[in-house]
Image (cartoon, rainbow, N blue to C red):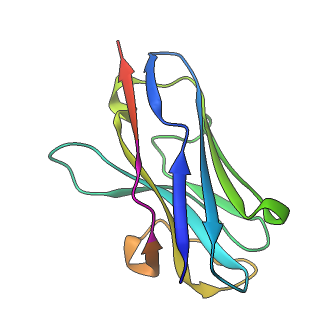
Amino acid sequence: QVQLLESGGGSVQAGGSLRLSCAASGYTGDYCVGWFRQAPGKEREGVASISSGGRTTYADSVKGRFTISKDNAKNTLYLQMNSLKPEDTAMYYCAMARWEGYVFRSLDEKDYNCWGQGTQVTVSS
C-alpha cells in the first residue's frame, strides 16, 4: 500500500521560505508526483508536478517562486517555496499519479489516486 508522508510546513512571514518534503513508500514503478494545496473555503488546486523523467510544470501563481524536485534514491519529493505570500497559506498535499510516464505530469487532481495527509503552511503579512 502506497504511503505518502509530508513534512516541513510551518509559519513564516511574507517573503520567507520553506521546504516541504514528502516521503513515499510501498510502491514500485516511477510515477508522476505532485503538490497540491487547499486554502480554507477554496477548492484544492495543483501547485507543481514532476514527471518520472524530471520534467516539471507549475501553477502560474507560483512560477518563479516554487521549485519541485525529487530524490529517487530516497523516494522523497520536495517543494522549495521562496518569496512566500499570505495567499500561499494553505494545507499542502503531495500526491502520486495513476500512471507512469517519462514526460507525464499534471496539475489536475483527477490524475492522482494516492494522497498524503497534508502539512500546513501559514504565511503572515
Q: List the single residue furthest toward the left.
A: 41
Q: Is residue 97 magenta?
A: no
**Residue 44 point in image, percent of width and height:** 30, 57
Residue 118 vs residue 59, the one in the foreground: 118
Which quadrant of the figure has residue 30? bottom right
Q: Residue 68: give x, y in percent of width and height.
A: 66, 50
> On the rendered structure, is 116 left or right of 124?
right
Identity of the residue drawn at 53% across and 78% down: 97
> Image quadrant for the C terminus?
top left
Tell me which segment is drawn in magenta: 115-119
From this view, report whether residue 26 is shown above or below residue 57: below
Secondary structure mostly seen in the magenta stretch: loop
Q: Quadrant of residue 34?
A: bottom right
Left or right of residue 102, residue 111 in this image: left
Q: Is residue 118 magenta?
A: yes
- Residue at (73%, 86%) from the top-left corner? 29
- Look at 63% across and 59% down and name the residue there: 23
* 38 over 61 or under it: above or below: below
Q: Residue at point 48% right, 36% down?
A: 9
- Residue 33 versus residue 56: which sits nearer the camera? 33
Residue 12 placed where, x, y %?
46, 19
Q: Choose top left, top right, bottom left or bottom right for residue 115.
A: bottom left
Place of residue 43 in the rendered image (x, y in percent of width and height, measured from the top left): 23, 56
When the figure is inspected, residue 81 is found, relative to residue 39, above or below; the finding is: above
